[in-house]
Image: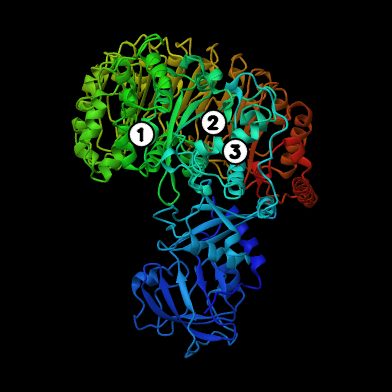
Amino acid sequence: MSWKNDDDSDAESSIASREIDQWVEPAHEYDNMGYLYYATMSYEKTVSAVITQASGETCDIQGTFDSCAVIGGDELRRLILSDKFKVSSPNDGTIPQKVWNQFSVFYNPNFDERPEVVLPRSIPKSYRYLKNDAGGIPVNLGAQEKPVFFLYEWTVTCHFVLDRKQERVRLGFTKKDTVQDLKEKLGLRKDIPVDELVLFFKGVILQQDDANLHEAVGIQNGYEISVIRRPDIATRPIQSIANPSSDHRSKEFDSCQSIADAEYRTITISQLLDVALQIVQRCKIEGWTSTNPDDKGKCLEPQDVTLYDLVEHFIKPTTQKMKCSYAEAISPHSQGITPAYFVSHFWGSSVFHFISVLLGHAHDRGLGYHTPLWICAYCINQHQVSSELGTDPKATPFYAAMRLSKGVVSVLDTECVCYSRVWCTFEIALALRDFVDSPSSQRYLYDAYTLKKGGLVVGLADGVVQSDKDSVRYKSDNDDSKWQNQQSKRQTLFPMAVALTAMKVEIQKATATKLEDKHMILNSISGHSQDQDPPSSHPAYETINGTLRGKFAMSCYRVALETKADVKPFRSTLLTSPLERVVGIFDNCDGFENEAPAFLRSLNAEAVKELILDCSGLKFEESEEFVVGLGRLFRLESFTLRATWLSWLGCAKALWGEIAGLKSLQNLDISLWMCKRITHLDGLPEAITKLRVLTTLQLNFAGCPLSEGIDSLADSLAKLESLKTLKLDFFRSECSSATITRFWENLGALRQLECLGVNMFHSKNFSSLDVVGKSVSKIRMLKSFQINCSDCSVHRCGRLWEDLGTLKCLEELEADLSSNSKYVEGAKDGEDPFQSPSGIEQLGDSIVKLKLLRRLRVNYRSCHLRQDHFQICWRNLGQCKALETLSVDVAYNRSILDMDGLAESILMLPELHSLHLYFTGCPLSVTSVHNFLTRLAAGLRDSKPKLSLSLRFFSCCHPRRPDDPQQYYDEISSMEELTAAVDSGQLEEGLEASRNHYSMSR
């Protein structure tokens, strides 16, 4: 039996493409289902079938089909609605429940005597049953030919780039499938010979056809791979090489750019891929042989070509005429380019391996194919190496290129020889020890990447990378935590053997091709002059060794716990490592529950200055179980602890006691989010008073039912004269009204504060903002103020706006007053029984006084805001000449009927570059919206072409039927004009925004 292409394959592809476009926000219940593949002989009308689940279980099922196809998502829906087939199931229990559950999304498992396959209720009733042309009567099937159903547990998205056209197709696969299996399915689907398909995953070519998709390559459910057809541009040269008369040895560069400063000579991944193509074209035809003394004269295969071989057989010959570097020969820029990353690597590894690793690194970092890299073999003139390098390592192009770049990436070979080469270890030492900051004032980065068996590129990246961020689907306030968790999971794939090898590095024993290079580097590290032999041991050597060892020990600590490996080598390495920044992400890592005290005791107290620790989701009952030993880190300047969802944690007193001993602490960030047994802050106020040099404090008690202590905390904070930034989160606090009042009164004593943020969301005893304004107005140096009192009992806010208007230094103001309104008993018929918080109309008068205000965000969602109050709020908006960002949310305020004057006020803001307006659920008239958008578009077309704009009008613009019928028809006419303007793009030109940014209900 063979698979057959559907006649409607183009239609399927287009449907699949549309489905993928909606994948982020699934619009239908079917969009997350796997695909159901089935095949049958074309002449069979009614057949029996066998379902084969990915686990290998099988069961019989009956059905009628008139062609073979691939169904799922929209395609399944289209086939269902076509009334082409009927599916039924035996009712004798022969189908295992585990298998039947796979169908429960679109099959009704509660079948009766004559089971029918029932669709979800969202399908129109007339299509509830799958029927054949005979009217839905089950058919007794007895055909000998049985097609096979493959119910795949996982699907992979194939992103095709064919003939400059792009489309996406989803295919199913099992854990046993190989790269070759996937190629065969793709070839049949697109009618392309398998040997012409090239597959990429995370930027790396899948070269081993027998590699398992899941275990070797690392592909999981929902991942995406790229598919291209071997392009003509690549096949034509290969065909010409096949002609023996073609002499490729004579091909040299006839011209080049003269870039005097070697540190500005760079090469891109795109240009490296061209080098790989040259290797394929030239290697065997030109008879390249190995430059390795042990394999002298051995003919090379393209995949075995090392950088030593490439320099000898390709780089030097092609640049011989111009006597230049390869980067100069191919550079389109006469002045060169500043490198983004410096690449450290061993010349003896495969060039293909090297390029594959850089592709994986670029994928993780979110780098483009044209990102400039500095790679010595290509950027140093190989015809005059000695004159370009000189005798001082810190005066070489290597050093200068590293200084210019944002970081170093080590390409580790499979044997980890890289760390036994003196140049490589010296480059890493500079990245970890000497280069603290990059030219962009960001922390200098060091990444280490390698290629696992099967082609999976894995690495230890310095901090969170772009792929970690992309893996987090929805944005939220704790994105940093999610990104770091994703980083930890990604790094668990790093080979333990490579980490253990790196933890034994000794730079004094590293080797070099030239002995004088080793002497030069060791003398530079130890501070000795170049005219003498370097010392055999030196404290500077141990600093470099310990830093590199600690880097790998910390990155693989969790991997060791989860794989139940011996963690003693990791502890001993950390104890002697001079590593200053330690990041330990152990959330939901059961092995850390018993390891936590040993881990903290293994940190070098004389070195660690920054510690980030995440132990969320574990079963700690007392804080001493995971913080004992923290207080001994006397040099610690920054401490971040995420201990969220510790359901059993009832007391944090030991935590506060350990923190009290951190006398050098300048930055403290503690999150006990959703620790529902924490009801008080015993010990915290006393501990805080001992942190005399603290400048930044963030405490997150969201979800903790605190009943007391926040007023004492605020009183203690007044004693911290260095504190500049304070952010507190008391979401769902159960403190009394009196306690909350004292808390705000005590905050007024923090006269030195520059940034203050407080979250009191859903604190039902928080009823007045008067005390907030009175206290905050005393902090005269305040530049940023954020308050969230959403869903509280706030009924007065006028005093807040008046007092904030006196803060002459205020640059950023965010206030969330959503879902605050007061129920009024005895309201007359037709009157709104809810009243909005009094005083909100005074905002307009207050913001005019804030001459330095650059960012304003106000949320009045569901506050029963009156139309006249809304207009008063924004009547003076145009006078805020420094305003750069404006966000206003008045959604679900049913009294707001129009936006008269708002567009004019916005257009008076000369510095505005970001505007967000949300009117969802407001019964705006169509005429009002049309006029607002038209005026805004006309004004922005010339004055603000780069404005970032987001407008929301969902569930708005419904024409109301007034007493005058003509007015109703005018509303309908305006609505049609507005719809036509949006559809035609007339408004889009002026708004410089996509339709998604000004969505509305029609």
Local secondary structure at mark 3: helix
Q: Amino acid at mark 1?
A: Ala
Q: Amino acid at mark 2?
A: Ala
Please give left or right for residue 66 compared with residue 36 in the image.
right
The residue where tag 2 is placed is 377
Local secondary structure at mark 1: loop
In three-dimensional space, the C-alpha distance between marks 2 and 1, rounded to whole angstroms, equals 54 Å
> Residue 866: in sight, yes or no?
no
Residue 702: which numbered mark, if any? 1
Check whether the beta carbons of the residues at disc 2 and disc 3 lie within 8 A of each other: no
State the image quarter where residue 177 is shown: bottom left
Q: Nearer the viewer, mark 2 or mark 3?
A: 3
* Nearer-the-camera pick, 548 or 237: 237
Question: Sequence order check: which comes first, mark 2 or mark 3?
Answer: 3
* Nearer-the-camera pick, 210 or 637: 210
Please give left or right for residue 920 compared with residue 345 in the image.
right
Q: Nearer the viewer, mark 2 or mark 1?
A: 2
Question: Sequence order check: which comes first, mark 2 or mark 1?
Answer: 2
The residue where tag 3 is placed is 314
956 above or below 819?
below
Residue 336 % position (x, y): 65, 24
Residue 273 % position (x, y): 59, 42
Q: Farthest residue in the front direction?
A: 297
Q: Amino acid at mark 3?
A: Phe
